[in-house]
Image: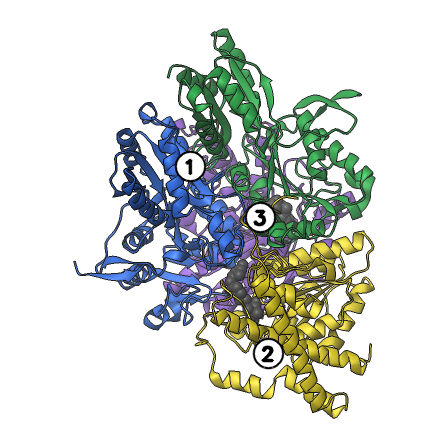
Chain colours: A yellow, B purple, C blue, D green
Amino acid sequence: MANYTSEQKINMLYDMMLIRGFEETVEKLFQDGKIHGTMHLCIGQEATAVGACAALTREDKITSNHRGHGHSIAKGTEVKGMMAELLGKETGYCKGKGGSMHIADLNVGNLGANGIVAAGLPLGTGAALASKMKNEGYVVLCFFGDGSTNEGAFHEALNLASVWDLPMVFFCENNLYGMSGSIKEMVNVEHISERAKAYGIPGVTINGNDVLEVAKTTEEAVARARKGEGPTLIEAETYRWRGHSRSDARKYRSRDEEKDWRKNRDPIARFKLQLIEENVLTEEKFAELEERMEKDLAEAVQFAEESPEPSLDTLTADIYA
Amino acid sequence: MANYTSEQKINMLYDMMLIRGFEETVEKLFQDGKIHGTMHLCIGQEATAVGACAALTREDKITSNHRGHGHSIAKGTEVKGMMAELLGKETGYCKGKGGSMHIADLNVGNLGANGIVAAGLPLGTGAALASKMKNEGYVVLCFFGDGSTNEGAFHEALNLASVWDLPMVFFCENNLYGMSGSIKEMVNVEHISERAKAYGIPGVTINGNDVLEVAKTTEEAVARARKGEGPTLIEAETYRWRGHSRSDARKYRSRDEEKDWRKNRDPIARFKLQLIEENVLTEEKFAELEERMEKDLAEAVQFAEESPEPSLDTLTADIYA
Amino acid sequence: MMVREITYADAIREAMSQRMRADDDVFILGEDIGIYGGAFGVTNGMIEEFGPERVRITPISEAAISGCAVGAAMMGMRPILEIQFSDFVMIAMDNIVNQAAKMRYMFGGKAQVPTVIRLPGGSGAGFAAQHSQSLEAWMAHVPGLIVVQPSNAYDAKGLMKTAINNNNPVLFYEHKLLYNSKGDVPEEEYEIPLGVAEVKREGTDLTVVATGVMVHRTLEAAKELEKEGISIEVIDPRTLVPLDTETIIESIKKTNRALVVYEAVERGGYGAEIASMIGESDAFDFLDAPVSRLGGVATPIPYNPKLEKAAVPQVENIIAKVKSVMNK
Amino acid sequence: MMVREITYADAIREAMSQRMRADDDVFILGEDIGIYGGAFGVTNGMIEEFGPERVRITPISEAAISGCAVGAAMMGMRPILEIQFSDFVMIAMDNIVNQAAKMRYMFGGKAQVPTVIRLPGGSGAGFAAQHSQSLEAWMAHVPGLIVVQPSNAYDAKGLMKTAINNNNPVLFYEHKLLYNSKGDVPEEEYEIPLGVAEVKREGTDLTVVATGVMVHRTLEAAKELEKEGISIEVIDPRTLVPLDTETIIESIKKTNRALVVYEAVERGGYGAEIASMIGESDAFDFLDAPVSRLGGVATPIPYNPKLEKAAVPQVENIIAKVKSVMNK
Ligand SMILES: Cc1ncc(C[n+]2csc(CCOP(=O)(O)OP(=O)(O)O)c2C)c(N)n1
Ligand SMILES: Cc1ncc(C[n+]2csc(CCOP(=O)(O)OP(=O)(O)O)c2C)c(N)n1
Ligand SMILES: [Mg+2]
Ligand SMILES: [Mg+2]
């Protein structure tokens, strides 16, 4: 189990800050009408993305879902190309054709967000099988939400990964809701992690807002997968601060519940405090990080805004290989 | 818990004999080229069908699968109409249009066999929901095999039934194989019934070749469902004596294994012996039952063979209501 | 009848609510259709009126909930299932095509499946490739299914009542871009029969058969074309299965030219069926030009708005296509 | 090249085996494809040669195994997935249509999905409504997919090699009734290019475009018709996407008459696309009769053999249809 160096911890904190800053910027650009379509922000869930990816090498892969900005950034996908993609520009990771729900960056092992709930899990089994058959040693971690565990694809993928001992980690971000559906009403188990029993694999529930706990737990699962001992189901409890997508009055949950999570369980504030107590961080250093983040994001926005739109003749490009 | 009368026990035995006789007759007719297409025989599994249906009222419903002849007979569907259907005759339950995989008899609560593995489970949730919303009090029992528990439909249906407390019984006939796939290699749990944990419902594994144990267990599950306490998953261990369907060399299992089940775990021989020991049955009485069965089946075959084929103009009848 | 201007979404909601008040067997189920009102607000307020027993919020389980709708219908209920985006119907195909569409037939006429499956489809909202498809052609190819595609609020309300009262599985294609479009709609319940097209505009030079959102774009194009002296007749089939072939054929016998405009990918879209049907009909001898089609480009729907627009027929494309047919 | 007579099933197996010997990235997965040899024996003996790592017997989980094939392809493998009956593809639609077909495009060209999905389809074996469908039109409507439909052993082997080496998702439609049909097939590997139709028979009076098992029934019909002095040209497109429009159009310019024959339900089948394409092409001016179609009856496939035969075109139906077109 790696003991993270101060530098690594600072990097984790920075990534969490960058994710939140990215999402806040995207939200603003959306309100200003510079981003269209829809988006699913992960503000409040920064620790799951960063903690999980901290346990992965660059060669390891992730599959993501509709709420994927944080996963991408944590896996090393750059905010410039992401921002450009959200603005539908040619310089975006998908050349402006994918948008928020389809950002992918295979060079860093980011196999892509997905607009279909739970679709990343079956795809992940395939990537893991390729790793196994080609002896490439990489592990595949699939991010998905609590609500997606009621899809048949979740069941079939976990079973397949289990019987084939695929090098995988199934990482469930349980943010208590699937869109408007409270997970308490959508499943009859106390913890999503109990579902691991149906596949004879380990299942564990952790605090998804404690980035180090997330990293530690994921590391164990990754080690297990790499040893060829098969997949693990991790349930990380967290909370989505914003609405499900652009238009959500959040009638299905209380303002008090939201307040509690924001005030008392903010993954960034928590980690910041922890690092200050560990004397790894100072307020000055934190201010520097904020400055750097704002600069990085400002550059990303400028890059995106100055980038050209894809030309019309690219409409039918890249359909077939 | 009902203590079955001698008459009820004799009826159960007779139904088991009738099922086996029916299947042997079908097999013969198939070999003689009088039945075409395919068929999935349930010889060796008579106790699951009869035991489970013994716990149901006529108003209760079942959904079945591709191996459904036994389920139909046990639920009260008549062998005449079934035989006629297998011969593709107008007098068959489906007017010759459905065949072996689609026999249905709504009048006795037989909602139909199904050619799609696990498809009967989601359909069953709907029937159970109708029972609940219309306050009709009937319970829906879904028959399915071990192999179908790896379909997403199994997962989604059990979860839905659980969170909605639907009046259902999920009855898994674990005959060790899904076609050629050994269930031991297809799931990573000791018992299919463990999968109930993923839905917070009771799960139990029983001897599927002991008709009274099957009936008793199903009765408890049905009582629970009727009380509005939700579904139960029953795994009944049994064995398919024949190949999966018409053409199966059974290379995936050993002759010794087959012999062991046939010789030592024949559900009919077992029940017969038990009833003789209980002085409920005599060899004479058993011989009478056999005679009656042969007569019933002979009549069914005659009825089927003498029945007319559907006229060509029925090709497009009954597509739309 | 008291008539007001309401939106397409309001019209669908009103039709469902009126049926639910009149018939206890009717209920709705789907993801987020409760207090959230569904992804497009179509079910807003319904759970408040009818409660959670008849407005059933489901887990994210398209295979189970579609099977549940079919099973409940088989047992005498009249479920209305909302599939949040029509693209997610992929996960429900078995229940719709292998079960609902065939059950009555396979069972020799002894069952019926009166259920409505609502499918919000179409592009134009920036949701990209997995949330913008128009795949109604798949369903129209399957015997046992009824396929409805209302283009306006009035038709949406009338066809929804018809769909709910129909004893077969009905695929009800709604269009994202139409939800907020307003139209005059009577308060009272009314039905629009299946298989009856509407001539949206009379013309003499060319008949355009257009579906869904294309009806509006074609009507706009018609105005422009009129200025240039081209008079087109516009027909909205309203229901794809059954299809009102007679109205279409009669119109073409009059105008002698035919163009089919649809949003779905042109290749293999239902417009191909309509065009072939015309070619095989006795309108053939009246044709002064080949029966033409204008459908979507053979591409997944891109995210960038300019590309997205370019992927499906717009008013200017329709104008250009009509002219090219006129010059043939 | 050394040529022998082998069956359609043997030809598919041989093509897969030869590719697997030549390319470690190629492997097969599916239900019961091991010692059982698959429902139709196509994979007989393969697990004995290649072992369980490359002949992967899967659980009964069409959603997982189709996603697994797509994911593995994305990461550099070349999986061949057997869906036991094409009807079961309903459960795999999301992975094929929302994922495989769109991934490359959605990702801006940064991924490719070289996988072959084998789909045994068609009626005639008495398997009834859920095991006898012909739904290739669905796939042909989806941009990003390639759709292949070999009608004989030679084409099956050559197209399989092409499909395996192609870098896109290929839907490979096989026909149950053809598995045991024999043909001359070279031992060596060879490819048949996509989008190249074959003129199976030359003729002067009418062009029939036929697919799958209908190619054989049409050729039989042609013999009968010849006796009556009607000379038909028969074209087998072999691949639906891409489609060899040129060969079809040139033929019709010569014969001046066109009929499209397919097993799928006529309404909304791919034959509608072919017929519309012909009508819109410059063959239009050469037509002496409307472009006609003969497809399956709009019904689920019934179990009774007489009804089953009546549900899809038979030789006599083709003969009758050709005559009716000749008399138009
Ligand atoms: C197959 C499918 N069904 C429904 C949707 C619509 N949808 C998008 S996200 C979402 C909620 C997912 O909840 P969860 O998995 O918990 O992820 P979260 O949004 O909470 O991060 C739903 C219902 C979809 N995209 N795909
Ligand atoms: C969706 C689907 N996949 C595959 C099949 C082919 N198939 C029919 S029965 C069967 C095995 C089912 O095994 P199990 O559920 O254990 O039932 P059993 O045959 O053992 O009674 C398979 C793979 C099918 N009919 N439907
Ligand atoms: Mg969630
Ligand atoms: Mg079994």
Q: Quadrant of residue C105?
A: top left
> Does the image show residue A119?
yes
Residue D168: where, in percent of width, then height?
66, 43
User: Residue drawn 51% across and 30% down?
Assistant: D263
Q: Disc 1 sits on a residue from what chain? A: C
The residue singled out by tag 2 in the image is A44
- Between the C-alphas of marks 1 and 2, the distance is 50 Å
Q: Quadrant of residue A86?
A: bottom right
Q: Are marks 3 and 2 in contact (CB under 8 Å)?
A: no
Respond yes or no on whether mark 1 lies under 8 Å from ligand 1.
no
At label 3, the amino acid type is Thr
Helix, strand or loop under label 1: strand
Q: Residues within 10 Å of mark 3 (few under 14, many from 20)?
A: some
Identify whether A87 is placed above or below D38: below
Q: Nearer the viewer, mark 1 or mark 2?
A: 1
The residue singled out by tag 1 in the image is C293
> Does the image show residue A245?
no
- The quadrant of the picture occupied by the C terminus of chain A is top right
At label 2, the amino acid type is Gly
